[in-house]
Image: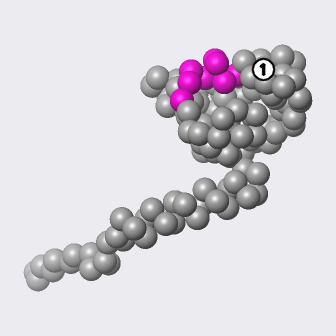
Amino acid sequence: MPYDAMSDQTPPLDARATLQAGHRLRFALSAAGIGTWHLDLRTRLATYDESLNRIFGLQPVETQAPLEERLARLHPEDRARVAAAIDQAVSTRADFFTLEFRIVRPDGGVRWLRDR
C-alpha cells in the first residue's frame, strides 16, 4: 500500500500584518461602540478591552479584574440575573449567550448594554 506525506505550504503571516489587522479590528470595534471581554474560567478574572472600559465610563485601557468586581458596576436590579446567566453559560459550556442589562457609570449615568 503506498504512503503519502503532506505539508502545509501556506506562507505564515508576518508580525506586521498581524499587528495591523489587530489595530484595524480595535478601530472598527471602537467606531461601532462595541467592546469585548474575556473570562478566565480558572481564576474568574474578567479582561475588558479599551472600548468596553470606555462604554463603562472608565479609562480606555485594557484591564483585568475579578468577575465580582465587574458585576458590581451593573445596575443593582440586574446583577443577580446577569451573574446567574454567566454561571449557567459556564456550567453548560455554552458557546455564547445574549443578555440585556443596565450599568451604572462612575458619573451616575445609567446605560443599557447588550452582551452576546
- On whether residue 70 falls in the magenta region, the answer is yes
Q: Quadrant of the N terminus?
A: bottom left
The residue closer to the viewer here, 84 or 111, is: 111
Mark 1 highlights which residue? Answer: 79
Q: Amino acid at mark 1?
A: Arg
| Image coords of residue 14 (percent x, y) | 34, 70
Residue 64 visible: yes
34 on left or right of 47: right
Q: Which residues are magenta?
A: 64-71
Q: Is residue 66 magenta?
A: yes
**Above or below for 63 versus 95:** above
Q: Is residue 78 above or below residue 34?
A: above
Q: Quadrant of the C terminus?
A: top right
Q: Residues within 10 Å of mark 1 (few under 14, many from 20)?
A: some
The residue lying toward the viewer, choosing from 61 and 110, is 61
Q: Position of residue 18 (x, y in %)?
A: 43, 65
Q: Reply above or below: 100 against 68.
A: below
Query: How is the rendered protein coloured?
Result: one colour
Q: Position of residue 65 (x, y in %)?
A: 56, 24
The reply to whether residue 84 is in sight is no
At x 81% / y 28%, what residue is drawn?
105
Left or right, 90 with respect to 31, comes to left
**Residue 70's quadrant in the figure?**
top right
In the picture provided, is 100 more to the left or to the right than 116? right
